[in-house]
Amino acid sequence: MNLMWFRNDLRVHDNLALLNAMSKGPCKALFMSTSTQWNKHDVGDIKIAFIENHVNELSDSLAQLGVHLDVIEADDFDGQIATLNRYCENHNVTQIFANGEPELNEVNRDVKVQQGDISFSLYESDVVVAKGTVRALHGEMFKVFTPFKKAWLRQASVQQYAPYGLPNAVGPSLSAQEQSTSKHIFTNNDSARKIASKWPLASQVRNQRLALFFEDKHDHYHDERDFPAKKGTSGLSAYLAIGVISVNEVMAQLLQHSPLIFNDMKNKDFAWLNELVWRDFYRHLQYHFPQLAKGECFQPRYEKLPWHNDQSNFDAWCDGNTGYPLVDAAMRQLNTTGWMHNRLRMVVASFLTKHLLIDWHWGERYFMQQLIDGDFSANNGGWQWAASTGCDAQPYFRVFNPIRQSERFDPDGEFIRMYLPELKNVPVKSLHFPHKYLE
Ligand code: FAD
């Protein structure tokens, strides 16, 4: 019996591991919820609720292909290995299939599984260009983005992007009874579940939102992406973070829409692909520098910065009560929706580290606990970039001015008023400046 072990790849489309698992006869599928591990990695309840929704969707999709998804609770990564071994023994599993994950603990866990008795086939599907293949002249990983991007493009532009279709069914569709007795529940936090339920399921996004993005927004992305009051970005991050949509599939749609996209990286049309390159860049960094997952600064010389770490300033930042309207509106967007616009992530991260002088690890952790798209590589990369401990070609002297950013990117105060209704009557000329909010 083959086993497909789902982790951060909760999809039936374009899933190479699943395709292989199902091509060789009868197949079972397993997902392990790991509340202790999630807690250790600061995975927030909103993201857990989002995973929950997609595990239930996955279970239905697999049932139609004749595959039963077992969902089992395992404490942490060690618990996962023990649970996996027991499961394989009980179900006579002879081969396990999975898609790899780039983070250190996950890699170590997979190495241990590989050392076990059962054959374990791992595939790579979380990046556009394979990790470890984009290197500088002497074989080393790039430490800044632009040369990485140039080398990445040379490879990405000659690759084929033809997503794998649905696997052939291995048997008749399972009845509701055969499939599962009830829906799987991973969190009891009702408000988190309410927020996550506002995000459409991946099937809808694949069929509608993605196509609409390319039809309506992609070509204006360069001009609109920095304005948080506009819906100028794709909204795909949460789906990519848990692998319910594959980046390969996104690339295929992009090339269908813009077949010449690789021709000129200075062209405005390149702006959106540029963000996918950033995504790959941070994943490649994680692969080459696994110590990032241990909380280390990318630049060791910044390891001992004299942070102030004032708890009350941190609490004010978390609650959206610093008095700086754009910073506070952004934090309230995060706290109420589980998502924050990219421009604002940069503004609030710079504010925390360079105005309040609070250790970037505090912000990284708080983000992870709140974000629906929490993703270790992108979050760590974004925080280290903002704190200047990471891969920014303009390091410590890049400080975002929260007032100037507000005037530039929310000129009419539309976004600020959306999240700070207490400022709705403040005239725009003073809206961007620090305020004391009235109860
Ligand atoms: P779009 O603008 O439509 O971009 C398309 C896709 O590219 C995104 O869905 C995302 O997968 C990827 N992407 C875009 N920008 C970046 C970037 N700067 N770095 C890496 N990938 C990017 N992104 C996460 O997915 N998870 C995180 O935990 C995360 N934490 C961040 C923390 C900080 C401090 C900063 C500055 C950025 C962080 N980002 C993170 C990156 C970025 O803010 C989000 O990916 C983006 O806002 C998601 O919106 P979108 O899907 O509409 O993106």
Image (spheres, rainbow, N blue to C red):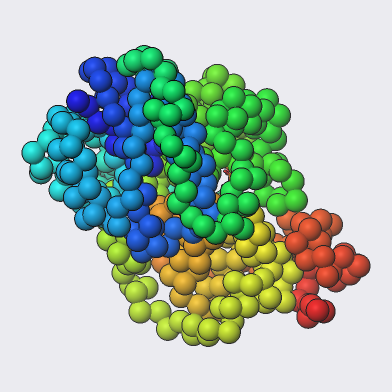
Q: Residue at x 50, y 67 (%)?
A: 366
> Taking the image as drawn, is residue 343 in sight?
no
Q: Position of residue 56 (x, y in %)?
A: 48, 37
Q: Residue at x 42, y 18 (%)?
A: 173
The quadrant of the image that shows the C terminus is bottom right
> Taking the image as drawn, is residue 280 in sight?
yes
Residue nearer the viewer, 26 or 434: 26
Left or right? Give the position of 357 relative to 109: right
The quadrant of the image that shows the N terminus is top left
Residue nearer the viewer, 135 or 70: 70
Left or right? Give the position of 171 relative to 365: left
Q: How many marks?
A: 0
Q: Position of residue 158 (x, y in %)?
A: 38, 22
Q: Residue at x 59, y 71 (%)?
A: 318
Q: Position of residue 157 (x, y in %)?
A: 42, 25
**Relative vertical location of residue 97 with respect to residue 397 in this rendering, above or below:** above
Residue 113 appears in which quarter of the rendering?
top left
**Relative vertical location of residue 167 with respect to residue 192 in this rendering, above or below:** above
Residue nearer the viewer, 214 or 299: 214
Q: Position of residue 138 (x, y in %)?
A: 22, 44
Q: Residue at x 30, y 57 (%)?
A: 75
Residue 63 appears in which quarter of the rendering?
top left
